[in-house]
Amino acid sequence: MSNKKRYSMLASTAAVAFILAACGNGDTDDNTGNSGNGSDTSENTDENASPGDEAEPVTFDQRVENEGEPIDGGTLSIGYVSDSPFTGIFSWELYTGNPDADIMSYTMGTLFGYDENYQIDDSGAASFDLDQDANKVTITLKDDVLWHDGEPVTAGDIAFAYEIIGHPEYTGVRYSGDFANIVGMEEYKDGATDSIEGITIVDDKTVEIEYQTVGVQMLQAGGGVWSYAAPRHYLEDVPVAELESAPEIRENPIGFGPFKVDNIVPGESVSYTAFEDYYRGAPKIDRIELETVPTTTAVAAMENAQYDLFMSMPTDQFENYENIPGYTNLGIDDTAYTYIGFKLGEWQEAEKDEDGNIVEPAQNVYNPDSKMADKNLRQAMAYAIDNDAVGAKYYQGLRRRANSPIIPNFSDYYNEDLEGYPFDPDRANEVLDEAGYEDTDGDGIRETPEGEELVINFASMSGGETAEPIVKYYMQSWERVGLKVELLEGRLHEFNSFYDRVEADDPEIDIYQGAWSTGFDPTPEGLYGRLAPYNYTRWATEENDEYMEAMTSTEGFDLEWRQEQFKEWQEYFMDELPIIPTLFRKAVTPVNNRVGVYDITVGENPDTEGVGLHTLYLISEDRATE
């Protein structure tokens, strides 16, 4: 069994701002269903959304250029749209939610750049070389890459990031097969050694990492090689077990990005100032002010020209901000998708012998007796919902029905021929009948094949105007095929508490609505592998293990062979259906017309004038209103 890939969460999700946008703002199509107490709360039904509803596809530019002379300095104001406070963990090694990742992106810095195919190139702070024969990766830092306190970023800082994640007292979720694949890492994780055998600091700027095996996924940004460094000189005296709550992480973080953190109001705002010694050049603007904005007031904030940029703008409100004067909407296919997950097992911590050595790694353990273990039940639930109508009704075509857990952005690997689960309630009823789910007492609700009551507890997040209607629609749709689905505790749950319970395998949750940011590597092992903590369904099979190992094997350097493995896995996955992929999506970024140039094109050279954060400039002291 092998596990060599970890995705980032965009709920997450993303990873999590995306999840919040997906689940918190709703993901399906109409309203109705039973609340947690079983009563009918569907004041709004799905009568306005019919099967086959379609919205005209919306196209966007990915770059805007506004004419005008740059002003001297200035402050860029960002509205980060979210109904939950960001956690405020300024550490790539320790964060879990995408809001933190987004907020860190202005300050912490990353090692690698990437091209239009998300493949690592030389545009970042370090170069990258993969030696397939030696199973070795060499990372070499560029000149003049400095931490915000003036200390140079070194090869030791790159190694330190691995030492944090592999430490026996590490509290985060990043340790996975990617790290276990490093020679000597598991001995370090077990506490048997004080160093990692496979990591060699060649000189101040060069580090070599030896792996047991290498795969083609390592050439992708986020594809198995950690893309970050951690400041050893600043953090090494803080016990790893205490890092997550340390002021060096929460209050006064340092990175090597274009802006330094000046002030943090936990969960609400961050102020940044320009880092004059940034290795690509001093930023052209003086400051960035980022504030969280509730989804309910985001459109009004744009109408009042409160911010220069709006991040994570909810697409379910697009029709309300599509034509607001003074702004240009840029859009791109999101590296994320929404899904409904089925709880099929639990996370099992590592088993150790009496000497403390790990004999079985931490892993997902599938429970064949779980309530949702019958794939016929899962498939019927997928056929019962109309995600084409959801995308049309709630997202004006900015979301569309997903047919796979691989997003279309990864065109070399996405199986466009998969039908997925189009809306087909007749087929849903047929599948349930054949599987023995029958209404034995005449109340319109099906019992299990054993004749027992079947009540499915559904967890979903609050946030946005469509969150509740969409959840109700799902529940009503399932009720129409005879399935009793109740909202967990009769209500939607705040984002952070929702994911705490999902991650902890709360036994009260049978199904849940989430979303993933896929990162920039299509390899799905970090979300659906046996050793992946983010495999929240806890689904694990030997056949899936084989696919995961194949995707990350050396044979994968044969692109056609690897593409075939992906195609077969998607067919297998969509038949097993541990999740229902519900919606692919577009991300929309409104940009005020006083911003000189803004570009969201994938792989755009960050040194191009006006593209990188350090080259952003403003052309007016006041925000544009027309």
Image (spheres, rainbow, N blue to C red):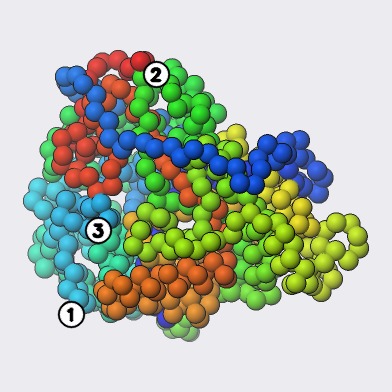
- Mark 1 or 2, which is nearer the eye? 2
The amino acid at mark 2 is Pro
Quadrant of the image for the C terminus? top left
* Residue under pointer 3: 119
Asked where in the image residue 213 lies, by quadrant, the reply is bottom left
- Residue that carries the numbered disc 1 in the rendered image: 133
Q: How crowded is mark 2: few (under 14 residues within 10 Å), some or many (20 or more)?
A: some
- x and y percent of residue 604 in the render? 22, 45
What is the spatial separation of the Cα atoms under label 3 and label 1, in whole angstroms?
Answer: 20 Å
- At horizontal 40% and vertical 47% (from top left) the residue drawn is 334
Q: Disc 3 residue type?
A: Gln
Query: Residue 569 placed where, x, y %?
Result: 46, 72
Mark 2 or mark 3: whose residue is earlier in sequence? 3
Residue 376 position, x and y percent, is 67, 69
Residue located farthest toward the right when viewing the structure as drawn: 441
Quadrant where the image shows the N terminus:
bottom left
Residue 487 placement (x, y as % from top left): 71, 49
Q: Which amino acid does label 1 sit on?
A: Asp
| Residue in the image at 12% along x and 63% along y | 206
Above or below 72: residue 247: below
Q: Which of marks 1 and 2 is nearer the N terminus?
A: 1
Q: How crowded is mark 1: few (under 14 residues within 10 Å), some or many (20 or more)?
A: few
Q: Tell me the residue that label 2 is attached to.
A: 325
Check disc 2 and report its element: helix, strand or loop: loop
Viewer-proximal residue, 517 or 110?
Answer: 517
How far apart marks 1 and 2 lie (CA) works out to: 57 Å
Q: Under tag 3, what secondary structure?
A: loop
User: Does residue 94 appear in the picture of this structure?
Assistant: no
